[in-house]
Amino acid sequence: QVQLVESGGGLVQAGGSLRLSCAASGSVFRANDMGWYRQAPGKQRELVAIISSLGSTRYADSVKGRFTISRDNAKNTVYLQMNSLKPEDTAVYYCNADIMPDTRFQYGYWGQGTQVTVSS
């Protein structure tokens, strides 16, 4: 059994910063791609950023230059540093990870979500 536990959301004023963390625990042999998605009220869930096990990154155009994704492979943890936050960044942020519980299989897992609210 694998769990993704997120932390770091909250309320911040426009222009401020927040750092999200997501730790994978349980039967983790290897964590491959790890990433962050977000879902605003009335909108579809969208990709924010993703990072491979080797450190390659990809960002949504809307967050490039403001958000930075990183990871600690030894801790099976992924981070999202969010700077210059805007009210349109307000959403529930979800962690996603492709986890291998052993050498044979890979499964996708989601965290429970953490609320980020940016006030104007």
Image: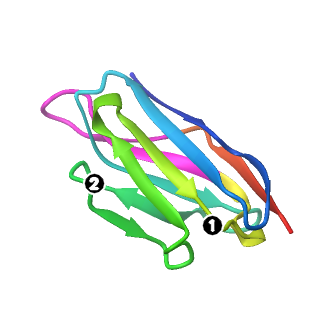
Q: Rate crowding at label 2 as few (under 14), some (14 to 19) or many (20 or more) other CA atoms within 10 Å.
A: some
Q: How many marks?
A: 2
In-front residue for pair 117/44: 117
- Give the Cα distance between marks 1 and 2: 24 Å
Identify the residue shown where x is 38% and y is 44%: 97
Q: Rate crowding at label 1 as few (under 14), some (14 to 19) or many (20 or more) other CA atoms within 10 Å.
A: few
Residue 95 within the magenta-colored segment of the rendering = yes
Q: Is residue 33 above or below residue 62?
A: above
Picture quadrant of residue 27: top left
Q: Check the picture and name the quadrant holding the N terminus.
A: top left
Residue farthest right in this picture: 120
Identify the residue shown where x is 78% and y is 55%: 117
Query: In the image, what residue type sits under mark 2?
Result: Ser
Query: In the image, what residue type sits under mark 1?
Result: Gln
Give the left or right position of residue 72, taking residue 64 as reference. Answer: left
Identify the residue shown where x is 26% and y is 55%: 55
Residue that numbered label 1 is attached to: 44
| Labels 1 & 2 near each other (Cβ < 8 A) | no
Q: Position of residue 116 (x, y in %)?
A: 72, 52
Residue farthest bottom in this picture: 61
Q: Which residues make up the magenta segment? A: 93-110
Colour theme: rainbow
Picture quadrant of residue 108: top left
Residue 90 within the magenta-colored segment of the rendering = no
Identify the residue shown where x is 39% and y is 51%: 70
Residue 52's label in the rendered image is: 2
Q: Position of residue 33 (x, y in %)?
A: 31, 50
Tell me which label, 1 or 2, sits earlier in the chain.
Answer: 1
Residue 10's label in the rendered image is: none
Report the magenta stretch's main SS.
Answer: strand
Tag 2 secondary structure: loop
Q: Position of residue 48 (x, y in %)?
A: 51, 64
